[in-house]
Structure formats: structure tokens, C-alpha cells
Amino acid sequence: MGNEDLLNKIKKIVTRQSFGVFIALIAIWIFFGVATDAFFSFNNLINVLRQSSVIGIITVAMTMLITSQEFDLSVGSMFALSGILFGVLTMTVGLNQWLAIIITFAFAILVGLVNGLITLKIGIPSFITTLGTMMLLRGAALVTSGGYPISGFRELSFINIVGGRFLGLPAMSIWFLLIAFAGYIIMNKTKLGYKMYATGGNTKAAELSGINTTKIKLIGFVLTSVAATIASFTSIGFLGMVSPTQGQGFELEVIAASVVGGTALFGGSSSMIGAFLGALIMGSIKNGLSIMGTSAYLQQAFIGLVVIVAVIINVQFQD
Amino acid sequence: MADYLLEFKNISKVFGGVVALDDVSFGIEKGKITGLVGENGAGKSTLIKICDGVHQPTKGQLIWAGEPVNINSPAAAKKLGISVVHQDIPVCDNLTVAENIFLGPKIPGKNIFADRKYMEQKTLKLFSELNVEIDPGKLVKRCTTGEKQLILIAKAMSKKAKLILMDEPTTALSPNEVTILYKVLNKLKKEGVSIVFISHRLEEVQKLSDRICVLKDGQYVGDLTKKEANEDIICQMMVGRDVRISQEYKENFSTEEEIFTVEGLQNKEYGLENISFALNKGEVLGIFGLRGAGRTEMARSLIGDFESTAAKIKIADKTVEIKSPKDAFANGIGYLPEDRDELGLLDNMDIVENMCISDIDQLTNMGFLQKRKMRKIAEEYQDKLDIKLSSIYQNINELSGGNQQKVLLAKWLILNPKVLILDEPTKGIDVGTKSEIRKLIIELTKNNMSIIVISSEMIELMSIADRMLVMSEGKLTADLSREEFDEELIMKKAVTELSI
């Protein structure tokens, strides 16, 4: 009897969506641990967490959006534009930094609403809508900044929230951990998460149950845009500057992290723990390869390979 | 005057020119079980969707407990206390049993949090009232269809609904589950809940219902009390028509020669049992059955699209093996599917391409399309079938349903099959084209083609078929010659297997 219980417990853990990605992460760590001396040092593992943070913060929200059956390709551009907007407001216009933060978040909410309303009210697939806004927002970032990076943020006091270190961890990592935890709670414990799963699982059934699926998806779009903005602030906190070209290709890295973590591309199924581990995989590869001294060009190819292998491993563990 | 909970006052519903409901007025009595019967397309499902707020009536007024109401969304219907158990069993496969039951605008739990423990306990309690055993924490994708149906019924109960409407709740249930459902319904009735029960199983409707209401062609025919009802009267009300076009004269080109015989077709998954029949050369063989009788499943099993077992199929005198639609076509069997949009049309391609696709290998030269040859063929069939179009290079999606159907028919005629299976060939097309297609079917048999027509439109079948098979619950229940055609008899045979 005790044996059977144990077996059942093991089976439950192994068939969880996040187990396969966990194995994949361990495999990658072992690989880098063997290939380099420096990978398994405490300081470097903290670096891994930091390098996963920006992608990770956006991945949390994107996982929620994909769960409810929509996509957002504009997150990479939004990651640049919100930082640029904040920079222009504080540095060029000279606005109070807290007011500028509020305006930037209001703008993020607006972008999320625009993405969502065009998709849901006009009926254009979110893939197309956000492909359009991706280019639109990138252009806006380049135009408003004149193509130049903005720096000088270290003089602002808000940098203390998004930069520096707390408890030995970089601030952006703390934000990542907090947001991932919040994402876990939302998806597993709240009514909103419940409704997102239902919407993505069977939109018609959810609607017939009296769920306003349009509203649920709209919330997902807004959260994703807001997450890209938070990620942008933490990046400013770490680097002290913002570039209008930053975040190119992030949208695909974020979706890859989410999918590696077990999110079904057509909605209804996802795991926040898996998404967290998926983001860690992205960070681990970038970190490990740069320690190994491989060229930056190789990173892209390696990430692509890992995405495919990780998803294959993940599928094996699901029944 | 009866005590009505919900009353329909002159309700009409028009979908893009098609009248689904035509001035329907009647009421649903409080605390009673009302049976609702009618042929396919009589408007039962539309009426239910109006109660549920999925559709809004084009004309007319709903009266709820004496007050006029507008039900403009499923959420509004739930607020009033109306719960619907839909026919196509909409559930979220990715959620657990308990999560499905409590899915709605108001989810149990404090503030923003969902209380899953409470839901599971409540679900256990609901199930124990229903006397069924399903693990509340089980994922719904691991449930049987019957269990899913019970989940939806439990869901309706959990809402403390005043009115529960059920659209064919028993089609997917095992006899054991059906017994459970009967008990549940009678229990709910005792507690004062009003129930509307739609079913093709007339015996079941009679047994359960206090009153039976009949719809026909979108109109309300009348009602019967439990005492008045018997199968003959109900069938008569369901099909009773003014004109008997079946009596019209029809040329018969069938011969004695058997061209296509099927012996012992089985398909467990779709409930097909021991189907055997023979089709004569030049014959129009009608197959009639109500929705869910397994007509389309049988046809698609015949052409090897669905896997079936133990079927011995002979073409002329030769036994053939049909494992895929390709084998079927190679042996001269053509199949025009019921679902034009999903299975028939090549979307956004032109008429020539749609017609020639079936014979495309013959129309290419070293891999290049022979456009001139294709055009000629398309023009020939456009002329033959009198397809109304502005150009043969027109996008197929721009044609009317009737003309689209003609294009698809042409696609098969180009191949000149020995046997042509037509699945609901006149579904959703206008009356004029319907009659043209009927004429065409007879015309084809004149040229020695043998045709099977599957339809749920009895009158139409009666007018064109030389012989008719009736299907019910995956079995053939009658083989009638043209002299034996009789609407009430056919309807009776179509519902015979449905009693339990």
C-alpha cells in the first residue's frame, strides 16, 4: 500500500507539465557544469537568474495570454518604447519621475487595450494585429528617440526600486521572482486564472457558462503589455540606460520560453512553474555559452536547438 | 388558464432569409416536465437557444413568470434561473469535473480566489444526490460522453435553476445512465423545477412528460397531454403535411443487377451494427434517418474514411477491399459529403479548380496543368448542370449554396463513378435548386449510374427514391419498396430502436 502511494506520487510528479522542462534544465546545467569551471559558482548562478529575468517577467504574462488562446508579438517593441517614453518624459521634458511612471503604465495599458480590441472586436487574429503593432511601436521608439539611446537615469531616485541589489540578489531578479509567484497564484488559485483556462480550453463552453471571454482575453493583453513595461524599467535599473533597438526578437524568445515550459500553443493548457523554468533555460544558455566563449551568433542557433529538444522531452513525459 | 413559467408569444427567428421559427406561441408550465418533439429542422434547437440568450428572436416576446423579458446573453438567462443542457455537450476538456460544474460568472470563493476544495465537496454532494460516481478532481478529457452529459446536468442543478432545458440529453447515455437521468428529472420536478425535454425517443418523451408540444417546420403544431399521447398521434403531428409530393410519378431505371453490396458493416466507435444492403444498377436508394442515427458515419465507413470492421463489400460480383477514400474512388465509388464547407469546397479557389481536382492527374502533362482542357471540362459541366455563375474562374465562395453543391456534384460526375453516395445533397440550398438536383439524380440513373441518397428530409426521399432503407441508432430498421412508402411508417421505423 505504502509502495503504491509512493508510486502514484512519483507518477503525479513525473506527468506534471513542468517535469520535462525541469529535466531539460538539469541536463543543460550538467552540460555547462562539465564544459566550464565557472558555471556552478554561486555568483554565476545568480547571474543566470538575472539573465533570465527580463525574458522571464514577460513570459509570465505571455503564458497567461497564450492560455486564453491569444498571442502578443509586440512585447519586444513595447519593451523598448516604454523605456524610451519614460526617458523622453523625464530627461527631455523634465517631468516628475513618478508622474512619468504613471503615464508610462497608462500608455502600456492603452497598448494592451488597442491590441486586444482590434483582435477581439474587429476579429483579426492576434498574430496579425500584434505583428502590426510590433512594427508600429518599434518605429515609434526610433522616431521619439531619434535613434539614440537615452541615459542618465542613475540620478533619479526611482532607480533604487528597479536597480541595485536586495538580499544579495539583483533587483530585476527579485521582480522576476515576485511576478512569477504572482502569476502562479493567479493561474492556480484565483477566479481570473480559472476563467482564463476555461476560455482557452473551450471558448464556446465558457461563453455558454456566462463567462465574458472577450473581457478575459483583454485582461491578458493588458497584462502582457504591462509586463513588458515592468521588464523595461528593471532593464533601466540594471543598465542605467535605454536603447530604441533593445528587445528585438524578444517576442519569439518569450513565446519559446513559455512553450518550452509546457504551454499549449492553442491555449487551455499551461504551467507557471514550467514557464518559470523555461525562462531559466533561456538565461542558462546565454550565460553558459558566453562563459564558454562561443560567438554570440552561435547562441541563436543553440537556443533554437534547445527549444526543439526541450519540447520533445516535455512531450515524452505527458500522457 | 395554466400556470406558465415561460411563455413564447409570436416568436419568429430568421437566419439570413431562412425561417427557423415562424410565429410560435405556447407556454411551459411551472413544475412540470414538458416534452418537445419535431423532425430535424423543426426549430427545437433554435427555440432552446432563444431561451438561453444565444439567439434573440427576430419577432415576438418572451414572458417569464408573467413579466415580459429580453434574454440577450447566456449570463442574462442564468440570472433568471434558466439552465440549458446543450446537445453538443460544451465542456472545457482541460478543466476538472468540479471546475466545469462551477464555471460561470460567479465562481465560489472569497475575493479574487477560487475555492476548489469547496467546489469538489459540493460536486460530491451533487453527485450523491444524482446517485452517480465520478471523481470531482478528474480531468474532463478523461470522462466518457455519458459522464460529460451528467456533468452538465449537475451543473444545471448547481445553479438552482428554475427552468432546465435539455436538448436530447439521452442520445449519448448508456441505458444505466438513462435510468439515473429519469430519476433525477422526477426528483427535480418534485422540488418544483420546470423541465423541457427534447428527444427523438418518443417512448421516452411519453413516459417522462406531463405534456408534449410538437413543432413542425418552425411552426407550433399543438400539444398533447400524457393521456392523449401515443406514438401514432405524435408521428402524425410531426410529419403531417398538406401536399403529398411522394405520390408524384417518377421514372424508374433500376435493374435487377446488383452493383454494390455491403455485408455486415460494423463500427463500434459510431455504434454501427451489422449493416447489410444491396444497391441495384440504375437505382436510387434512399437512406432515411434522424440526426444521430449514424447515416453519415455509415457512408464514411463505406468509403473507408472511418475505420470499420467485418464489412464485405462487393462491386458488381467482385469483392473489394476499401481501406481509404482513395480505394473507394479507385473502385468507382464517389461520395458527396454532407458538410460542404468542411469537407467539400476548396476555399477561395475558382470553379475550374474545384471541379477538376478529383481528376487532376489526368489533366496534367509532366506536372503542368493543362488549363485549356480543364476549362473545356468545366464549361461542359457548367452547361450540363446549369450552374449560375459570372465566370468559370469565379471564386467558389461567391456562389450560392445550391450552385456550390452543383460544382461539387460535377467534380464527381467528371470521374463517372459507378456508385455515387450523396449525403444530404439538398441541405441548406434554395427550393428551386433542390428540385433541379432531384431531377439530375434521376437523370443520372437513366445513364446507368447507381445512387445512394442519404437524407433527413423524408418527403424529398420519398419523391426520388426507388427503394428506401431506414436507419435508427446505427441499425437498419426497414427496407421499403416505393409502393410501401408511408410517412408515418417511416417515422415509426426511424424511432423504433430509440426506445429502451
Image: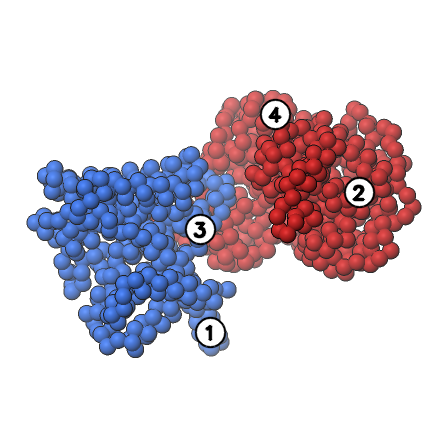
Residues A227 and A83: in front is: A83
Alpha-carbon distance for marks 2 and 3?
44 Å
Q: Picture coordinates of residue B305 (x, y %)?
A: 68, 53
| Residue A7: mark in rendering | 1
- Give whichever of discs 3 and 1 has the lower sequence position: 1
Res. B372 in view: yes
To which chain does the residue with label 3 belong?
Answer: A
Q: Amino acid at mark 1?
A: Leu
Q: Amino acid at mark 3?
A: Gly
A130 displayed left or right of B380: left
- The chain coloured red is B
The residue labelled by disc 2 is B451
To which chain does the residue with label 4 belong?
Answer: B
To which chain does the residue with label 1 belong?
Answer: A
> Which structural element holds mark 4?
loop
> Which callout, 2 or 3, points to the residue nearer the camera?
2
Alpha-carbon distance for marks 1 and 2?
59 Å
Q: Picture coordinates of residue A107 (x, y %)?
A: 25, 39
Q: Amino acid at mark 4?
A: Gly
A266 displayed left or right of A110: right
